[in-house]
Image (cartoon, grey):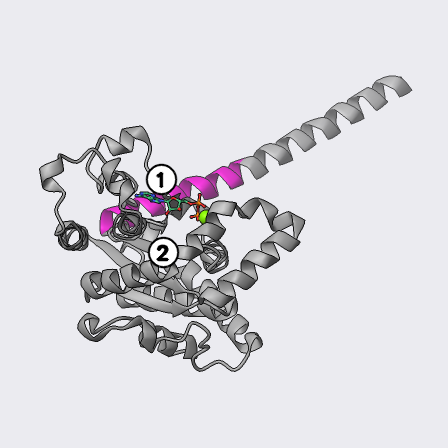
Amino acid sequence: MRRGARDADRYRVDDPNSFRLKHIDPADTGSFRGKDKAEKELAAGTAQLSEFQDKLYAQDRWALLLVFQAMDAAGKDGTIKHVMSGVNPQGCEVHSFKAPSPEELDHDFLWRSMKAMPERGRIGIFNRSHYEEVLVVRVHREILATQKIPSHLVTPDIWRQRFDDINAFEHYLTRNGVVIRKFFLYVSREEQRRRFLERLEQPEKNWKFSLADAKEREHWDDYMAAYEDMIRHTSAPHAPWYVVPADHKWFTRVVVAEAIVETLKGLQLAYPRVDATKRKELQEVRRVLENEAAMQRKKTARTKGDARKTAARSSRRKKA
Ligand code: ATP
Ligand code: MG
């Protein structure tokens, strides 16, 4: 097992009841002392991921759903980009969940997630997800009022009910062959401040910044409380949360990559076996293709011979 894989195990929440955010240091780099070794491992991880994805696609049985949640500037986009860099785009789809549209608000809150589920053989990435329903919506209670839920159904129990619904949803998906892994990229408040300042200073990063992002920092503690409660209630053996330290991007990436590699390794993926009928069909195709090449060679030889004869005939004619 590679080093990053052991680190990934460490950040997987196996005992949700005893989970506390304060036990995790966002600046942690696990067993790595520096960037270089982590980047080498990341390269090895992405190469392996690409092989597994090819088999996942060919086998066409499992789907893999990767959920990413984080505060702004924690590095969701960069992690997705780096970790999936070697993966065939045909077998992978990214969905970014923003504030719900009017059509989405006309449905139950899991509707849009269900619509975005990866097909068998594919990897689906949720850049934010149904978990926003117990994060931003919980921190900004006024959003709940826009959701058009009959008022007597909105009680103080709503968050616990949503946890139950999400757990049931993920159980259902698991029982249908969707493998779920969830990542909370845990950045510190100070590192977020530093990254925001960087976005302001670098013109090519200005577009990523808005005043609203900075204002959202006022709710930091509420968000952390919501994240902790969410992780405690929705981490399960079949759909675990990984709380990944995110103050060092190179570390976040290697941990996420290794967690995905280990998950796919556990599926024991294999290319579909070819049965006797199929083997016969393939032999026939080979015969046709080989014959075609032989026929082509014969045809070319004949054409060349004919050309030589015609040339000789015309030179004889000229001499006469
Ligand atoms: P980046 O800032 O890196 O481009 P992002 O994921 O933060 O990526 P934004 O467009 O900035 O994208 O933000 C999307 C916003 O949509 C977030 O503030 C998020 O909280 C909000 N959002 C997502 N899902 C919901 C939801 N179900 N209800 C309300 N708001 C939501
Ligand atoms: Mg944003």
- Is 55 part of what is drawn in magenta? no
Q: Quadrant of residue 219?
A: bottom left
Could you tell me what secondary structure mostly forms the magenta stretch?
A: helix
Q: Position of residue 48 (x, y in %)?
A: 43, 65
Front position in the image: 152 or 297: 152
Circle 1 crowding by C-alpha within 10 Å: few under 14, some 14–19, many from 20: few
**Can the viewer see residue 128 in this picture?**
yes
Q: Is mark 1 within 8 Å of ligand 1?
A: yes
Q: Residue at x 38, y 68 (%)?
A: 244
What amino acid is at disc 1? Ala
- Disc on res. 169: none
Q: Secondary structure at mark 2?
A: strand
**Distance CA(mark 1)–CA(mark 2):** 14 Å
Q: Residue furthest left?
A: 152
> Which residues, given as a range, are shown in magenta?
276-295
Above or below: residue 269 compared with residue 248: above
